Image (cartoon, rainbow, N blue to C red):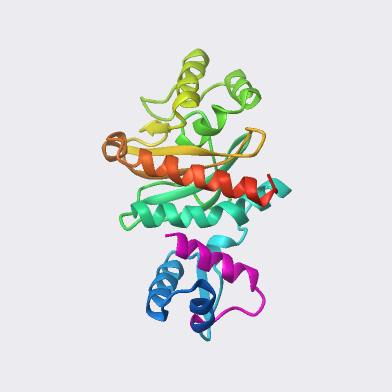
């Protein structure tokens, strides 16, 4: 999947004119047939679009709806979005990229082959205390956690954590493992697992998640890949800052 990420980065560098398959294959050092296969996958997921045989960033790479404007979020979208595509390729499940702005703000999303009944959309918001993305971010942001605990923790399902002390204990475990899970806490029978993308100073800048049927997510088979992809995304984010 590293080559797919490289292709996305090559396309982004030549956003204005777009690049053809032959040029992309040459720059990536890949056979044209492999390049074409990867480009088809990236186009199908919305990561790239093509016009007259020239590839440009797709809707997945472009701001939509009410995403907060900030240098950090701009950098997250640019640097971390390719890793969202990598997570999709590794799992074929619905995957999401989000940041914290009081609530969870969805920055990008790719639907899996079997769509999870998730109401999230790019630019939309969700409560932090009952989503895996939100809990992953709260675990590494004490101030945001205390602000969340100071408000009423709304109950969305019978599994939602609504007691502030319980939420504090819950995110403390997430801080140790770096794995956050929504076990049907936001939507009945829908689960997700997330981990965090970290800046050089150890502060969380984003989280990536995999969403699907609650029992399938609960089994834990997606935990290792989420951790791995988030670790690589964190390293890429640090490199983008020269750290």
Residue furthest toward the front?
Answer: 29
Instruction: Provide residue 176's location: percent of width, then percent of height.
Output: 47, 24
Q: Is residue 70 visible?
A: no
Instruction: Provide residue 15's location: percent of width, then percent of height.
Output: 64, 72
Residue 125 occupies which quadrant of the picture?
Answer: top right
Instruction: Provide residue 52's location: percent of width, then percent of height.
Output: 53, 86
Q: Quadrant of the N terminus?
A: bottom left
Verify whether residue 133 appears in magenta.
no
Residue found 48% across the figure and 65% down from its top: 46
Per the picture, the main secondary structure of the magenta-coloured stretch is helix
Q: Is residue 113 above or below residue 15?
A: above
Residue 170 falls left or right of residue 27? left
Q: Quadrant of the C terminus?
A: top right
Q: Is residue 107 above or below residue 48?
A: above
Q: Nearer the viewer, residue 115 or 141?
A: 141
Q: Nearer the viewer, residue 140 or 30?
A: 30
Residue found 68% across the figure and 47% down from its top: 68
Residue found 62% across the figure and 49% down from its top: 76
Q: Nearer the viewer, residue 12 or 127?
A: 12
Badge count: 0
Instruction: Provide residue 187's location: percent of width, then percent of height.
Output: 38, 37
Q: Is residue 98 visible?
A: yes
Residue found 55% across the figure and 33% down from its top: 137
Residue furthest toward the bottom?
Answer: 52
Residue 166 falls left or right of residue 54? left
Residue furthest toward the top?
Answer: 165
Image: magenta residue range: 1-21
């Amino acid at each position: 999947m590293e080559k797919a990420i490289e292709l996305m980065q090559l396309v982004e560098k030549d956003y204005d004119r777009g690049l053809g398959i032959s040029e992309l294959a040459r720059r990536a050092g890949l056979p044209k047939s492999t390049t074409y296969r990867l480009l088809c996958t990236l186009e199908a997921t919305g990561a790239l679009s093509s016009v007259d045989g020239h590839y440009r960033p797709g809707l997945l790479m472009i701001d939509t709806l009410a995403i907060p404007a900030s240098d950090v979020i701009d950098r997250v979208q640019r640097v971390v979005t390719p890793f969202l595509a990598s997570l999709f390729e590794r799992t074929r499940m619905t995957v999401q990229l989000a940041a914290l702005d009081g609530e969870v703000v969805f920055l990008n999303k790719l639907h899996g082959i079997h769509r999870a009944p998730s109401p999230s959309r790019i630019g939309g918001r969700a409560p932090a205390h009952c989503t895996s993305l939100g809990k992953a971010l709260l675990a590494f942001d004490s101030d945001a956690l205390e602000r969340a605990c100071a408000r009423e923790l709304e109950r969305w399902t019978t599994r939602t954590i609504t007691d502030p002390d319980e939420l504090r204990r819950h995110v403390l475990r997430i801080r140790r493992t770096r794995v956050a899970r929504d076990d049907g806490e936001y939507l009945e029978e829908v689960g997700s697992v997330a981990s965090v993308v970290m800046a050089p100073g150890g502060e969380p800048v984003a989280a990536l998640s995999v969403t699907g049927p609650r029992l399938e997510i609960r089994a834990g088979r997606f935990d290792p890949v989420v951790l791995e992809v988030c670790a690589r995304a964190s390293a890429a984010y640090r490199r983008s800052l020269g750290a």
